[in-house]
Image (cartoon, grey):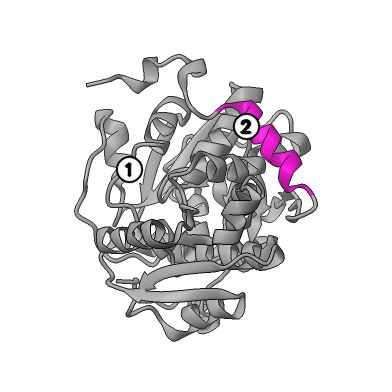
Amino acid sequence: MEDYTKMEEKDLPLQLQDVKDAQERIRGHVVRTPLLRTEELDEALGCTMYVKPEMLQVTGAFKARGAFNKVLKLTDEERKRGIIFSSSGNHAAACAYVAKQFGIDAYAVIPEDTPKAKIENCERRGGHVILWDRDYRSRMKKVQDEIAEHGYTLVHGFDDYDVMAGQGTIGLEVLEDCPDLDVIVVPIGGGGLISGISTAIKGIHPETRVIGVQAAACCGYYESKKTGKMERVVTRPTIADGIECTYPTENPFPIVMKRVDEIVTVEEEDIMKACALIGSGAHLVAEPTSSVVVAALLEKKINVRPEDKVCCVLTSGNYDIDQIGSLYQGQMVEAVD
């Protein structure tokens, strides 16, 4: 078994310069979200608290950063042929939005049982929806078949180095605003976001701890971090549906193993409490997927001191408004199957 922690930094396929190049490439296309000091959360979370509110990003999530970086690197011929992706959520909305800015055809292969609102959200931004089986492997087979037939370019949500580099611009912005940051806490789903952010953070300020958080219901990276190899886990439905993870994939995995200091998990009820706390304490609407980072601090899963400057990356705010309202009132909300 290869020990990824002993790999040389220079041997990893994603480097700080890739993220810096992405920052220049997407400048003017995305929002430079602020780093907010949220003093009202300090006592509850046990640290000097900051949040990076990516729900203020175009399409309401960080995903536009990676999508823009990928599309801006395409050749004219690739743009003519169009792009394809498999997602029914924030990645689909971002890809459709980005493609529309450049007059590119965008095709989304999404589960046939996807809620109508999500389908309409993608179509409203110009995406062409291909309904397919819910099984991820079946959908990716359909994606590859479409690429073989039409020559589309795949814009993968997390297993693409250009997409990772775009997401990593969040880390650059955080350190520009808080150079002496002690800890950054990031949700982990497929691993692309934390791969990009950890590359930026460790490349500039190696002493800053990078902590990943997964829902305990679907924690492939958490289990893999313990063994040092890609583990497949049995998952349960989770309210944090944007970070479901049965198992890691090859491209983000070595980066996460090398550059992420620690991965922790949180339970469903903790995510719900954190979602409400962000609304009342930070005055931001964060979807449960975003809220896992605050849940980890709230439940003391991360060792921090009151003087530690800690940034939680709030990745997105696209969620059913009625369910968010229920969370704010302390009611339980069903996990997403």
In magenta segment, residue 21: yes
The answer to whether any part of residue 303 appears in the image is yes
* Residue displayed at 23% across by 40% down: 231
Location of mark 2 (residue): 18
Quarter of the picture containing the C terminus is bottom left
* Residue 50: percent from left, percent from top: 67, 46
* Residue displayed at 69% across by 34% down: 21
Location of mark 1 (residue): 248
* Residue 84: percent from left, percent from top: 47, 61
Rendered position, 262 above or below 45: above
Quarter of the picture containing the N terminus is top left
In magenta segment, residue 307: no
CA neighbours of label 1 inside 10 A, class few (<14), some (14 to 19), many (20+)? many
Indicate left or right for 5 with 2 as reference.
right
Rendered position, 262 above or below 2: below
In front of the other: 180 or 67: 67
Q: Quadrant of residue 101?
A: bottom right
* Residue displayed at 52% across by 60% down: 83
Query: Would you say the residues marked 2 and 1 are in contact, meaning their CB atoms lie under 8 Å apart?
Result: no
Q: Quadrant of residue 67?
A: bottom right
Give the magenta-colored segment's residue range.
Answer: 15-27
For the stretch drawn in magenta, what is the main secondary structure?
Answer: helix
The amino acid beneath tag 2 is Asp
* Residue 131: percent from left, percent from top: 36, 77
The amino acid beneath tag 1 is Pro
The numbered dot on residue 130 is: none
